[in-house]
Every structure is written in structure tokens, then in C-alpha cells.
């Protein structure tokens, strides 16, 4: 059995024993992953596994659409991941290499010093008539000691249906230092679920704008309203909007800036319900934030059980979170692997929606903030000790240490939820 068919077999095996929803039933399409082409047309597989659509395997189509909608603001790296068009990011680029680069036709765009992370990045544009990928290779050759990469764009781990943004985000006065941080879109701080929390927002891609994804995630992190309660109800929250309502938002450089701000504000737990490929700038920024005492929590993503790890969840030390449905079954689209630390509710539940209302959510994006909220009041070992062991005995690559945060799941019907946020 070749690697591609083995991946399909693993997907089928993973789906056995799950109960599909109506939205999951349909013909199995040929899976495609970033950087993988030419997969065989396997046709329609028989049985339950063949009828369940692993929506995460459609990720490349979603990413291609993101690039197209950016109207030139984004392009694809050699593996198909969206990157900011015409930008190369270098860390620790020597003065000599920088001079040689400029002489070779590279254009200096900006330099960014992140004091809180002790990081300096240089952003350059490639020489004319040289592809971005080739320009990255040549710049790396000029300074083998530097780290040269693309300015990758990170996307929400649970995509948003409908309008992604509301209005310019507003903040509420802080009582003191917030322990919890969120890197996402902006948040609708006026929503009833967030009325009890002091929310400070800052935009890193222009003016902070409240978005559907960030608002839903924030509610599951600190929200409280009637029967609804997040992981840390009523806690203060720092919100870093790295999108600003822009299609080309979510760049690695803005994510690193947001992490630096979280360190400056002394946040202790930061949730990142976003996914992307491995990126040396983000990896180093995460490591520096961790060294300053920040616990980074991230959604493992919805690219399916056979997909490679996504980041930042798969970086060393990051708390990776997967999602389960209403019967505590793993979401078929959820990623698997050694980087899965906890499982939490990620479907069949409500979260904050637009206009002060509620919406139904699905995806690992919405499981991660529950764990982040819980970790703000207890250590990771303590939380693991309280987890319900599911799947294989002990820690496993599907549920991690087990299921936590089930009280944060509120049935959509209980709050009159309308609409959906999901992949």
C-alpha cells in the first residue's frame, strides 16, 4: 500500500465508530493537501467511512480562495500555503548580508524590533523578475547563519461562514493586569456574554475590528451569560487582532508582534485558534514567549486525522487542543498526533454571535479557548489529572490527556442560536 492510499485507510479507520451528522454525509472527494498533488481518483468508497466527508481535506481549495480574494496581497509558497506577497522575513541578518542583498536588488521594507522577545526581524522585497521562493533561497545563501523565511499567513482553525467582521472593536477599562490573552480577530466586547469581562484590544494589522471568529472564541474563553459559561467566566482579556478585517491579515510578523505585546502586558495564558505551516519567526517568538512564562494554547486544526501537524499547536511546549462532539466523540476533521494535549467540546454547542445573539460553532478553534480559560486558574498537570480518559488507555494521539471543560458546552437551542461558524 503506498503512502497516499495508507493515508486514506487511516482516515477510514479513524472514522469507524463515529456517528455522522447530516452535514457530514456525502460523496468522498479526492483529498488534497498543501504541497501534495496528483492523488488518485478513489471514487466513492463503500460504507460509513466512505460517506463521511473529511472537510479538512478541502483545505487547499479554501487556501486557494483566500489567495484569490486577496487581489494580489497574498501568493503561495512552494507548498501552497498563503504568504504575504513580495515579503521575505530574515532573523539575525548580518549587516554584510543586508548590504550584499541590497546590492543584488533586494529592497529593504522595514525592520521590526520586538524587545519583549529579544527579536529583530528584517523584511525585504525580492529583486525584480525573481520569484519569491528563489529570492528566499538566495538570501539564505548570502547569510547561512540567519533564518530566512516567508511571511506566512495563519488562518482561523474553524472557518467563518458569512461576514467575518462586525465594526471597529472597542475596549473596556481594565481593573488590572489581565492573565488571559487572545490572538485572533477583534472581539465584540458589547456582547452580553462578555459584559462581565474587562477587554483591552489592540490592532496589529490596522484598526482592531470585531470579528465573528474572535468573538465566538472569546466567549468560550471568558464569557458568562445565564446558562452560558466559558473556561474562565468573567476573567479580563487582552485581545490582539492580527487581521484588521483584511483578507491578507494573519501574517507571521503580526503574530510575533502580538506575542511580544502579550509578554509586555504580562499575560500568562494566550490562546491562538489559528493554523499555518511551520515558520521560523513564529516558532522563535513562541519559544521566547514561553521563556517569559507565557503558556500558549492552540487549536490542532481541522485538516483531518491523516494530515501533517499544523502550527503553532505543534511547536514544542504549546498546549495543543482537539475537539469533540455532543457525545464526546472526536470530530472526524480534527487533527491527530503527539502534539494533542487535551480534548474539549468543539461542536454541538453555542458561542457568541453577531448583534448580541448566539451561533452554533464547530471546530478545534472553539475547543482551545475552553482549555485556555481552565489553565488560567490551574496548572497543566492539575488539569490533566482532572481529565476524563477517552480512547486508548492513558495519553493518546487522539484525545491527549483526555477530555476537559464539558460544562462549557451549552446546547444551541438553549440560547436560541442562529447561524453557524464552522469549516
Image: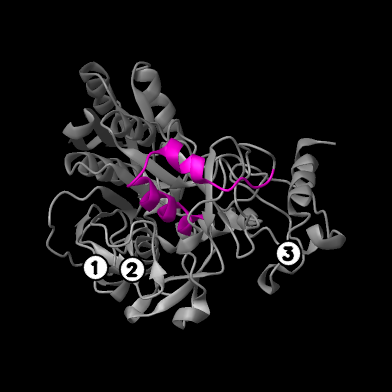
User: Which mark, by number, is residue 224?
Assistant: 2
Sequence-wise first label, 3 or 2: 3
* C-alpha gap between disc 2 and disc 1: 7 Å
What are the residue bounds of the magenta stretch? 364-391
Q: Judge whether residue 127 can be spotted in this image.
A: no
> Mark 3 against mark 2, which lies toward the viewer?
2
Residue at the disc numbered 3: 19
Q: Is residue 387 magenta?
A: yes
Magenta stretch: includes residue 185: no
For the residues labelled 2 and 1, say whether their Cβ atoms are less than 8 Å apart.
Answer: yes
In the rendering, at what x and y percent does residue 333 appear? 63, 55
Badge 1 is on which residue?
196
Residue 276 location, x and y as percent? 47, 45
Of 63 and 172, nearer the camera is 172
Q: Residue 312: which disc? A: none
Quarter of the N terminus within the rendering: top right
C-alpha span from label 3 to label 2: 31 Å
Q: Are marks 3 and 1 in contact (CB under 8 Å)?
A: no
**Left or right: 105 with respect to 422?**
left
Q: Nearer the viewer, mark 3 or mark 1?
A: 1
**Quadrant of residue 315 in the image?**
top left
Q: How many marks?
A: 3
Where is 155 relative to 135, above or below?
A: below
Q: Residue at 53% x, 64% y: name it.
A: 362
Q: Is residue 400 above or below residue 29?
A: above
Q: Is residue 215 left or right of residue 402?
A: left
Q: Nearer the viewer, residue 233 or 88?
A: 233
Amino acid at each position: 500500500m503506498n503512502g497516499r492510499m495508507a493515508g486514506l485507510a487511516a482516515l477510514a479507520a479513524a472514522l469507524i465508530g463515529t456517528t455522522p451528522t447530516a452535514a457530514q454525509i456525502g460523496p468522498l472527494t479526492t483529498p488534497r493537501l498543501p504541497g501534495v498533488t496528483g492523488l488518485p481518483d478513489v471514487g466513492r468508497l463503500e460504507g460509513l467511512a466512505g460517506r463521511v466527508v473529511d472537510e479538512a481535506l478541502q483545505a487547499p481549495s479554501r487556501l486557494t480562495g483566500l489567495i484569490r480574494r486577496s487581489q494580489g496581497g497574498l501568493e503561495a509558497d512552494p507548498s501552497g500555503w498563503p504568504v504575504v506577497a513580495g515579503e521575505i522575513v530574515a532573523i539575525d541578518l548580518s549587516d554584510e548580508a543586508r548590504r550584499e542583498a541590497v546590492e543584488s536588488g533586494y529592497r529593504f521594507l522595514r525592520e521590526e524590533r520586538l524587545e519583549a522577545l529579544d527579536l529583530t526581524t528584517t523584511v525585504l522585497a525580492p529583486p525584480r523578475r525573481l520569484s519569491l521562493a528563489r529570492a528566499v533561497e538566495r538570501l539564505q545563501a548570502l547569510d547561512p547563519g540567519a533564518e530566512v523565511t516567508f511571511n506566512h499567513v495563519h488562518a482561523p482553525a474553524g472557518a467563518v461562514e458569512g461576514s467575518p467582521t462586525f465594526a471597529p472593536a472597542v475596549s473596556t477599562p481594565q481593573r488590572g493586569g489581565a492573565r488571559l490573552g487572545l490572538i485572533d480577530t477583534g472581539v465584540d466586547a458589547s456582547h452580553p456574554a462578555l459584559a462581565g469581562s474587562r477587554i483591552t484590544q489592540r490592532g496589529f494589522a490596522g484598526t482592531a475590528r470585531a470579528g465573528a471568529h474572535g468573538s465566538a472564541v472569546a466567549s468560550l474563553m471568558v464569557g458568562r451569560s445565564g446558562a452560558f459559561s466559558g473556561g474562565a467566566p468573567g476573567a479580563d482579556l487582552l485581545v490582539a487582532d492580527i487581521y484588521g478585517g483584511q483578507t491578507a491579515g494573519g501574517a507571521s510578523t503580526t503574530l510575533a508582534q502580538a506575542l511580544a505585546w502579550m509578554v509586555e502586558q504580562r499575560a500568562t495564558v494566550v490562546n491562538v485558534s489559528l493554523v499555518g505551516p511551520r515558520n521560523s519567526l513564529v516558532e522563535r517568538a513562541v519559544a521566547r514567549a514561553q521563556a517569559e512564562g507565557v503558556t500558549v494554547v492552540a487549536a490542532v486544526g481541522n485538516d483531518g486525522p491523516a494530515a501533517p501537524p499544523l502550527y503553532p499547536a505543534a511547536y514544542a511546549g504549546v498546549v495543543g487542543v482537539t475537539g469533540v462532539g455532543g457525545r464526546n466523540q472526536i470530530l472526524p476533521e480534527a487533527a491527530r498526533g503527539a502534539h494533542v494535549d487535551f480534548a474539549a467540546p468543539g461542536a454541538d454547542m453555542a458561542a457568541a454571535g453577531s448583534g448580541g445573539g448566539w451561533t452554533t460553532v464547530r471546530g478545534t478553534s472553539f475547543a482551545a479557548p475552553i482549555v485556555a480559560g481552565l489553565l488560567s486558574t490551574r496548572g497543566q498537570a492539575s488539569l490533566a489529572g482532572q481529565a476524563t480518559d477517552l480512547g486508548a488507555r492513558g495519553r493518546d494521539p487522539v484525545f491527549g490527556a483526555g477530555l476537559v471543560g464539558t460544562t462549557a458546552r451549552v446546547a444551541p437551542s438553549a440560547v436560541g442560536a442562529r447561524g453557524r461558524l464552522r469549516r
